[in-house]
Amino acid sequence: MSTRSSRCIVSLLLVLLCHGAAAALATRPAPNASLAATTNGTCRSRVEPFGYRCEEHTVTTEDGYILSLQRIPSGRAGESELGRSRKVPVLLQHGLMMDGLSWLMNSPNESLGFILADNGYDVWIANSRGTVYSSGHTTLSSADPAYWNWSWDELASNDLSAMLQYVYDQAGQQKVHYVGHSLGTLIALAALSDQQPHVGMLRSAGLLSPIAFLNKVSSPLALAAADVFLAEALYWLGIDEFDPTGDAVHKLVTDICKLPGVDCYDLMSAFTGDNCCLDSSSVQIFLSHEPQATSTKNMVHLAQMIRRGMIAKYDYGNANDNTKHYGQPTPPVYNVSAIPDGFPLFLSSGGRDSLSDVQDVQRLELQALKSHDKDKLTVQYLADYAHADFVFAGNAKERVYAPLMAFFRLQEK
Ligand SMILES: *[C@@H]1O[C@H](CO)[C@@H](O)[C@H](O)[C@H]1NC(C)=O
Ligand SMILES: *[C@@H]1O[C@H](CO)[C@@H](O)[C@H](O)[C@H]1NC(C)=O
Ligand SMILES: *[C@@H]1O[C@H](CO)[C@@H](O)[C@H](O)[C@H]1NC(C)=O
Ligand SMILES: *[C@@H]1O[C@H](CO)[C@@H](O)[C@H](O)[C@H]1NC(C)=O
Ligand SMILES: *[C@@H]1O[C@H](CO)[C@@H](O)[C@H](O)[C@H]1NC(C)=O
């Protein structure tokens, strides 16, 4: 199994752009996060070269994680500082094993981060804990097992609340539009379902390639990986950090690819579905920077969802441990129907997406959200789109981002 394959296959629920561009894949040196953030950070490397202003910010979560955020406060036209406090903030949340760069990988005319700035928004780009520019912690180092002791439950409760509060305050106490891709949609749905207090700072949410229910996932590779994780959870949890470039993951991939019925030949399509419209120049940028590490606990949590068909908190595997953490023998369920019916939601899904499967999305839209106010729920279906197209397609501006911004405007009246 080549390095290329192993790096691709493990991006269980995300964008795998490994088609064709394998040559670009050199082993990435272990980055010094604080050095990289100041010398090669996202602003410096990917925003300022295009003539946009960009600010690096950090925010500390309740449990001590130091997260970086990038802000693009104005568009290419470079409006004056005047009026900035009146701009509406938008927070962009990437998916699994990606980071904030996801929103900036295509040209400025094609990438959502730049497009929103050019359309008068105050753009804030999130980077989840564990990614290269958000690997700091007040007391732990990323070499400590305890640093990786979290799943998407904490991304929804702690990372999102800290970033939202920060953006809301910096923007002059203005409510924030949210855009999530893939795991970034689950984070928002979970926080909204729980009616966590910080969601009061949200104005609306745009969910691209929504992930809520995962039990119709059709990707054979994702299914096989989920089985391996659940069967060997104890072994995997001993590894703490799920580093897509590390040896343990390499072995996982090798094992999965030996299973009958799993075809590792076209990994990208096998995982995400057949993406229609990827921009090839962004593939190079992707390969030099992603996939990013996550926690093994997060992967096990996602595997639980794929195999159990529910959206619930992390399952510690037995009644005792669950009771210790949750005060009940089974993990609490996130009740998507409890999302306030009047909360503005924009859902965009693709017909060829093998991770955000059509049937799972229908269960979300038609069952879980069936009592949602019809004028607060905009649903878009793009028959030819797969998982990665929502962030990387050259035509996403016309197909997805223009309708998304039209929806935002309606919520600003
Ligand atoms: C990382 O870079 C920072 C800033 O230059 C430096 O202070 C620190 O010692 C470096 N850490 C390592 C592990 O090299
Ligand atoms: C900065 O980027 C250059 C070129 O991509 C790379 O060679 C260098 O190692 C990077 N430095 C850090 C600290 O990440
Ligand atoms: C990007 O859009 C601007 C404004 O619409 C246009 O002038 C420019 O030619 C476009 N650039 C590219 C590379 O398409
Ligand atoms: C992980 O956190 C839980 C509490 O959420 C704690 O019970 C457990 O001991 C922690 N494990 C490690 C390895 O830090
Ligand atoms: C979920 O929320 C809806 C709406 O508030 C409520 O009617 C339903 O009983 C809840 N379901 C569960 C299992 O709590």
Image: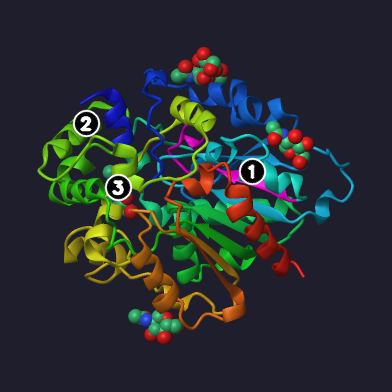
Q: Residue at x 86, y 42 (%)?
A: 79
Q: Is residue 74 left or right of residue 21?
A: right
User: Crowding near pointer 1: few (<14 within 10 Å), some, many (20+)?
Assistant: many
Q: Secondary structure at mark 1?
A: helix
Q: Residue at x 57, y 81 (%)?
A: 373
Between 274 and 345, the residue placed more toward the observer is 274
User: Crowding near pointer 3: few (<14 within 10 Å), some, many (20+)?
Assistant: many
Q: Secondary structure at mark 3?
A: helix
Q: Residue 297: give its label.
A: none
Whether label 3 lies within 8 Å of ligand 4 gets the answer no
Res 207 seen here: yes
User: Crowding near pointer 2: few (<14 within 10 Å), some, many (20+)?
Assistant: some
Residue 283: say if magenta.
Answer: no
Q: Give the amino acid type for the residue marked by disc 3 in the picture.
A: Met
Question: In which quadrant will I find the C terminus?
Answer: bottom right
Whether label 1 lies within 8 Å of ligand 3 gets the answer no
Residue 311 in the image: state x and y as whole percent: 34, 66
The residue carrying mark 2 is 248
Q: Is residue 222 left or right of residue 117?
A: left
Q: Earlier in the sequence, mark 1 or mark 2?
A: 1
State which region is magenta.
121-137
Q: Give the amino acid type for the residue marked by disc 2 in the picture.
A: Ala
Residue 87 in the image: state x and y as whole percent: 78, 54
